[in-house]
């Protein structure tokens, strides 16, 4: 079912504005991620969709129904809480069957459905246990099974993977993606982990202080962060964000339109599609991912300060005359600390943001 | 171990033994005197006679008063637990301005309500309400006295329960009573058991309120009846008093054993369960 929010604002009693005139449309069947740093309002948004919080203003629709004032139980959504919220006094079977108990389904049918759902999530042998006797991963699957038993039109998952340890998290991630794909039910999940959002979601909303800063597919969000906030947030190695200024080109390097960007004394070409958007004197911030910086003859010059092994690559931090710059180098090509290196952005990978508002300068 | 340490150790044990004996002697008396033909105030080897129990059954008020005590205790317990559960849930989950202040004030007043200082006003109140000499009058007064502490203890239990349990149930469509019955109460069962037993023991042992509010001897509970065992000569009838006391204390002991077996002895909000 489609979920649409229109200008939803949530102000808490204490005066905290957790959601700030937020509009959003989540498509039917979509696996949708709400991503952002802690305290940006992700959970509040999810709880507002669930009905556990009531929007201070704005409207919320699930499918074609306006549910802004509808109580949580009547919205046909199921939520998996960050702590899973399994009932400690009930067995796994009773937990999974709980939504059916509320719907007054008979005992025998309840048990059969709970068993079938549990079986589907490999909980077969655990049905008579209590939640406290399960591992984190098992508890998570019980919580998912219980949500599935409710047969909702929308699933809401609050940080579904954050309580699992690192190894299990990857497994559970793959499992979750497959499950969502098989069920095909609209699913909204909250995460503060950008890798999780990129890996799982069909689309991501990146949030900051109650607003959406960018909405797009993982590819769009990763390749073209719409502003420096998103640029700094997305990516497992933080993007280099270097202050610079647009300057007139100097003679022979002044290829097409003549302008260049000066970053700490180094001249970088302005990406071709935005040359008309910049005039000399404009202050900008240049964004370039460490993965897209390569060693070259000239370009930004720096001294290798730190080399961090990331497995198949290494992250190298260079000190330059300006801010430090990070790049990744392939396995086996690590420079020695103290060595001098020149780096240039890979063609087409340079992003330019306006310095005043931090927004991406896009092709006209 | 040096001689000084040995002496110290021996001294310590002698001290402990004396203290233990001080508290154990009355207990010992309680279990021997009922089986002794003519018990005195000192502990003596019992004759293993059941004659005192026979005498007790001859007293028209003795055994019925134990039944009266049970009725009072059970009703007070039921009303206290039910009302405290609802009130504690509401107080734990709804933001009431000045909530903690109100609770502390109630707690303070409750010790006054069933105490000696409120005897006269309570008597007058019950008189005006035509509740004198009625079970319901005593039950209500006792419940009123117990409720604040019961609410306080239960609220403590409910405060520590994650809200997500209830929210989860609500998202699945449970209404408030279902949330309470399916999720909240099962999770605070130790708290409910604590206040249930505590309320029963309190009523079982309360002398003042029934003494004040009942007029008819037949309606009096055991705590008051115990006061009436005198010989014709006006002397306390130790045979009947000890025998009755033994019967009177057995239910309390059983309840404590039950709670400790079921939940273990723990401190909850400063009250030992
Ligand atoms: N019940 C509440 N009362 C008051 N403020 C709240 C409440 N819940 C959340 N907040 C505030 O709203 C903001 C957003 O919180 P939340 O949605 O939990 O963030 P996130 O899940 O993104 O970490 C935070 O500043 C938080 O302190
Ligand atoms: Mg959160």
Image: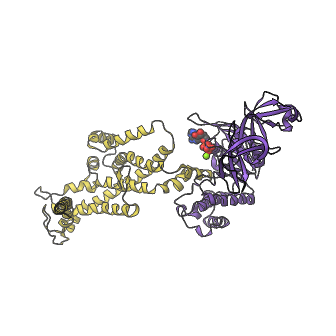
Chain colours: A purple, B yellow
Outermost residue on the top side: it is A281
Which quarter of the figure has residue B243? bottom left
Quarter of the image for the N terminus of chain B: give it. Answer: bottom left
Find residue A98 and report its horizontal and vertical position in percent.
60, 59
Q: Is residue A70 visible?
A: yes
Find residue B164 and report its horizontal and vertical position in percent.
56, 50
> A249 left or right of A151?
right
Quarter of the image for the C terminus of chain B: give it. Answer: bottom left
Q: Residue visible at 66% across and 61% down? A: A171
Q: Residue visible at 34% across and 41% down? A: B108
Outermost residue on the front side: it is A339
Outermost residue on the left side: it is B233
Which quarter of the figure has residue A313? bottom right
Find residue A318 and report its horizontal and vertical position in percent.
68, 43
Rendered position, A122 above or below A153:
below
Q: Residue visible at 81% across and 28% down? A: A280
Which quarter of the figure has residue A326? top right
Outermost residue on the bottom side: it is B48
- Near-viewer residue (B83 or A209): A209
Counting the numbered discs, the total is: 0
Q: Is residue A26 visible?
A: no
> B223 left or right of A64?
left
Q: Residue visible at 54% across and 49% down? A: B163
Rendered position, A21 above or below B219:
above
> B235 left or right of B149?
left
Find residue B121 and report its horizontal and vertical position in percent.
30, 38
Rendered position, A73 above or below A132:
above
């Amino acid at each position: 079912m489609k979920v649409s929010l229109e200008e939803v604002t949530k102000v808490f009693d204490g005066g905290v504005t957790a959601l700030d005139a937020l509009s959003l449309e989540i498509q039917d069947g979509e696996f949708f991620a709400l991503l952002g740093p802690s305290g940006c309002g992700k959970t509040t948004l999810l709880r507002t969709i669930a009905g556990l919080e009531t929007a201070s203003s704005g409207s919320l629709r699930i499918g074609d129904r306006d549910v802004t004032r509808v109580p949580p139980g009547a919205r046909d959504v199921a939520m998996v809480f960050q702590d899973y919220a399994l009932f400690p006094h009930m067995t796994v079977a009773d937990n999974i069957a709980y939504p059916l108990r509320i719907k007054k389904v008979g005992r025998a049918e309840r048990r059969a459905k709970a068993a079938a759902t549990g079986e589907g999530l490999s909980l077969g042998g655990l049905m008579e246990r209590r939640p406290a006797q399960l591992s984190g991963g098992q508890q998570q699957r019980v919580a998912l099974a219980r949500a599935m038993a409710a047969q909702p039109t929308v699933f809401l998952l609050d940080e579904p993977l954050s309580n699992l340890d690192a190894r299990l998290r990857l497994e559970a991630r793959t499992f979750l993606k497959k499950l969502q794909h098989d069920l095909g039910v609209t699913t909204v999940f909250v995460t503060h982990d950008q890798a999780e959002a990129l890996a799982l979601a069909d689309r991501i909303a990146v949030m900051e202080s109650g607003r959406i800063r960018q909405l797009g597919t993982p590819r769009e969000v990763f390749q073209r962060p719409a502003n420096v906030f998103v640029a700094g947030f997305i990516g497992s190695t933080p993007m280099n964000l270097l202050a610079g200024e647009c300057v007139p080109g100097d003679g022979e390097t002044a290829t097409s339109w003549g302008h260049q960007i000066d970053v700490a004394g180094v001249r970088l070409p302005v990406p071709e599609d935005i040359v008309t958007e910049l005039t000399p004197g404009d202050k900008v911030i240049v964004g370039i991912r460490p993965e897209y910086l390569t060693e070259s003859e000239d370009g930004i010059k720096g001294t290798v300060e730190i080399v961090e092994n990331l497995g198949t690559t290494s992250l190298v931090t260079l000190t330059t005359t300006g801010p430090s710059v990070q790049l990744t180098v392939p396995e086996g090509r690590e420079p020695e600390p103290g060595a001098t290196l020149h780096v240039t952005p890979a063609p087409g990978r340079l992003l330019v943001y306006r310095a005043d508002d931090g927004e991406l300068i896009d092709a006209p | 171990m040096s001689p000084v340490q040995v002496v110290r150790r021996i001294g310590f044990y002698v001290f402990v033994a004396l203290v233990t004996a001080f508290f154990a002697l009355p207990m010992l008396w309680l279990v021997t005197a009922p089986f002794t033909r003519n018990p005195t105030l000192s502990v003596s080897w019992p004759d293993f006679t059941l004659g005192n129990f026979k005498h007790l059954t001859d007293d028209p008020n003795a055994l019925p008063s134990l039944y009266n005590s049970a009725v009072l205790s059970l009703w007070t317990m039921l009303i206290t637990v039910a009302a405290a559960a609802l009130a504690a849930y509401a107080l734990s989950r709804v933001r009431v301005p000045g909530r903690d202040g109100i609770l502390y004030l109630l707690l303070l007043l409750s010790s006054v309500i069933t105490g000696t200082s409120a005897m006269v006003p309570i008597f007058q109140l019950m008189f005006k309400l035509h509740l004198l000499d009625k079970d319901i009058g005593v039950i209500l007064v006792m419940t009123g006295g117990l409720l604040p502490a019961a609410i306080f203890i239960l609220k403590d239990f409910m405060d520590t329960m994650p809200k997500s349990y209830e929210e989860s149930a609500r998202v699945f469509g449970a209404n408030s009573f279902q949330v309470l019955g399916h999720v909240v109460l099962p999770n605070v069962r130790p708290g409910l058991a604590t206040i249930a037993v505590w309320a029963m023991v309190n009523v079982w042992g309360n002398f003042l309120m029934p003494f004040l509010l009942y007029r008819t001897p037949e309606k009096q509970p055991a705590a008051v009846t115990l006061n009436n065992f005198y010989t014709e000569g006006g002397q306390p009838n130790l045979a009947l008093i000890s025998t009755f006391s033994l019967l009177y204390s057995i239910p309390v002991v059983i309840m404590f054993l039950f709670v400790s077996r079921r939940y273990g002895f723990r401190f909850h909000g400063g009250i030992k369960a």
